[in-house]
Amino acid sequence: MSPKILQRIALVLGVAVAVWALLALVHRSSRDRVQGLTLPHLDLAQADTISYVAPGDTVRLVRRDASDWLVNGYPAAAFQVKGFFSALADPGATSELVAETAASHARLGVDSLKGKHLLVSGGGKVLLDLWFGSRGPDFDGFYVRRAGADPVYLLHGRFADLTAQDVAQWRERQILAVEPDSITGVTVTRGRTRYTLDRGPKAQWSFSGGGPADSTKVARFLVGFQDLQTSGFPTRAVEDSVRFDHPARRVELFGGAGRPLANLAFDSTSAGFLVRADSGGPVYRLDSRLADELTPEAGGLKPK
C-alpha cells in the first residue's frame, strides 16, 4: 500500500475520531443539563410573596413595604429574607437527577400529600414553583421537583436547607434597639416598687427621689437595650391568653425633654418572662436572668 493511500486513510480516521469526540461532547453536555436542577436568580425587589405550604403547616411571607416583610402576620427578619434570595444564586448549590417518573413522587415525599409547596410570586406572576420532599441520604439535601414536572432531583446547598425553617426561624428576634447615649431617664416598676433615674450633667445619674446612683452600673444596665434579642417566642395559644393589664414588671425609657423611647411590660411565667411593648404588638420570651438585668432592683444601682 502506497504512502499516499496510508495518509488518506489516516486523515479519514482522524476526521472520524474528531467527529465522534464532538458528538460525545454534545451528548454529554445535553445529558448534564438534564441531570441538574437550575434555580432562577431572583431579585428581592421582584417578589412580594413567599409561601411554604405543607400538610398541617404554612409559612407565608408577605412584603409590607419596600424593605419590611411579615411572616404569618409577624415582623420577619430582614437578613433571613435577603438570605433566601442570595441562596438562590449560591454557586455552591448542586443537584442530581434521582428519578424521572411520577411513580417516585410519594416515595420521595414530593407529592401533593406529603410534600412542601414553595411558591414565590411578584407582580401577579409566579416566579418560582417547586415541591420539596424528604431529606436525602444521611440527611444531606432535599428531594425537589418543579411543579407540573415528573423528574425529581436531590438538591444540596443553603437554599435547600432554608426549606426546613419554621415560622420562629423566619421571625425578627430583635425586641429593641435603643442607643444608651440617647436615654436621659428610666423608670422601673417591680410589683409595687417603683423608682426613676435621671441623667444629669456629665452623664451623672441620680434617683428622682434624691440620692446618687452609680453611673457605671447604670451605664451597664442601659447597654442591655442597645440590641435586645428574644430568647424565643410563645405559642399562638399562650400569646392570645397572656394579659399585660397589670404586668409584674415594667421598664420605661425616655430621651431628651422626657420624650418616650420605649415602654416594655413583663409578665412572669414558670419558665421566665413574657415581654412586649406596652402599646401592643408581638410577645417575646426572656429568661429570668435577662429580665432581672433589664429591671434591676434599685439597691443594685446605688453606690457602695
Image (spheres, rainbow, N blue to C red):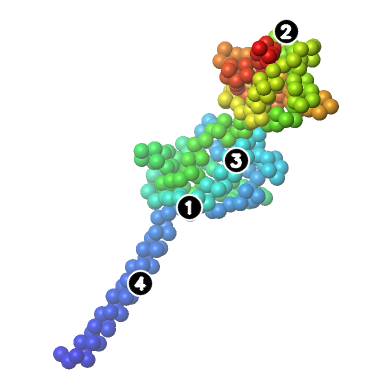
Question: What's the amino acid at mark 4?
Answer: Leu
The residue lying toward the viewer, choosing from 285 and 195, is 195
Crowding around mark 3 (Cα neighbors within 10 Å: few <14, some 14 to 19, many 20+) is few
Mark 4 and 1 residues: CB-CB less than 8 Å, in contact?
no
Pick the quarter of the image with the C terminus.
top right
Tell me the mark number nearer the camera, choosing from 4 and 2.
2
Mark 2 and mark 3: span between their CA atoms? 40 Å
The residue lying toward the viewer, choosing from 260 and 98, is 260
Question: What's the amino acid at mark 3?
Answer: Phe
**Is 77 left or right of 2, judged from the image as shown?**
right
Residue 235 place in picture, x, y as percent? 58, 23
Quarter holding residue 64: top right
Tell me the mark number nearer the camera, choosing from 3 and 4.
3
**Element type where label 2 sits in the image:** loop
- In the image, residue 255 sits, relative to residue 207, either above or below, namely below
Residue receiving disc 1: 91
Residue receiving disc 4: 22
Tell me the mark number nearer the camera, choosing from 1 and 2.
2
Residue 27 place in picture, x, y as percent? 37, 65
- Extreme-left residue of the structure: 1
